[in-house]
Amino acid sequence: MRTGTGRRSLITVAAVSMCGAALGVYVVGCVTSKPSTRAVKSSIGFNNADFYDKDGKFIEEKGKDAVIALMRYHGYSLADVIDKNRGELWVSDYQTGQFTKLGLAARMWKNNEKDKYMLMDLFLLPGQMLPEHWHLADKGNPVKLEGWLIRHGLSHVVGEGEPNLSKDIVIPACHDGGKVTVKCATVATPGVFVPLNKAGAHHWQFGGPEGAVITEVANVHTDSGVRHQDKAMNDYFLGN
């Protein structure tokens, strides 16, 4: 993980034409100008209660609706492709009941275990944390070594190194009581690529005020080789 500067970066906002959406999505200040590196008064948000039924069960299809709305807000070119193939979009709240605070959506484009390469897109809602985790060698595959290219929005990519977390990052209580073990952040905006500093390093991410669309590249991925810092999440993810 590259050592962050600790300085805040302006957000590049893609031009969009939507003004509001279903599923409790709220968009404030529609952006109609050309993409700019200047900060603009625009935001998108989601209501956590909308993602759960009356018994508190996470509704995956509503999670997918929100992620696709996020893609369209940013003008992500593959939004329609992903929407038409919704079964390939993975969303999870890690059984926390707090999807807008902690969760993840991912679309795996290719995971070639034979030749050891992988390409995947990740999607973070505004202020949503991808939990702290790391990777092990698994099923004859090497330890996953990865990097992230920010396509839209902003992500705080966090790993090993000198602590420099921004005050904008609030670790949710549903993540191991609000604790993490690594606190060196790179504030990544569109076009910034952040590599993991070494195989096996702990890492996590935190979506900026407009969320983030991220492309991940790596040697190979296996779910069974993932370990989470939060024991409850780890047990849930591994089916224990």
Image (cartoon, grey):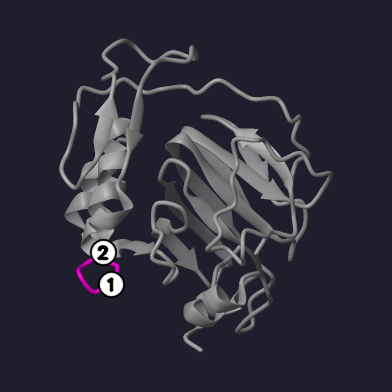
Secondary structure state at the residue bearing disc 1: loop
Element type at marker 2? loop
Which residue does the image show at 70% across and 41% down from the upper left?
185
Which residue is labeled 2 in the image?
Answer: 52
Residue under numbered circle 1: 57
Q: Seen in the image, is 11 located left or right of residue 59?
A: right
In the image: residue 223, left or right of residue 66: right
In magenta segment, residue 144: no
In the foreground, 26 or 211: 26
The crowding category of the residue bearing disc 1, from other C-alpha atoms within 10 Å (few below 14, some 14 to 19, many at least 20), is few
Give the magenta-colored segment's residue range.
52-58
What's the distance in space between the residues labelled 1 and 2, CA to CA?
5 Å
Residue 57 falls within the magenta-colored stretch: yes
Kindly identify the residue that appears in the image at 31 percent across and 20 percent down: 15
Residue 19: image location, x then y, percent: 19, 26
Mark closest to the chain's N terminus, 1 or 2: 2
Question: Main SS type for the magenta part?
Answer: loop
Taking the image as shown, residue 108 lies to the left or right of residue 170, namely left
Q: Position of residue 141 (x, y in %)?
A: 63, 76
**Residue 182 versus residue 150 in the image, above or below:** below
Identify the amino acid type marked 2: Tyr
The x, y position of residue 186, in whole percent, is 68, 38
Residue 46: % across, % down: 31, 44
Farthest residue to the bottom: give it: 240
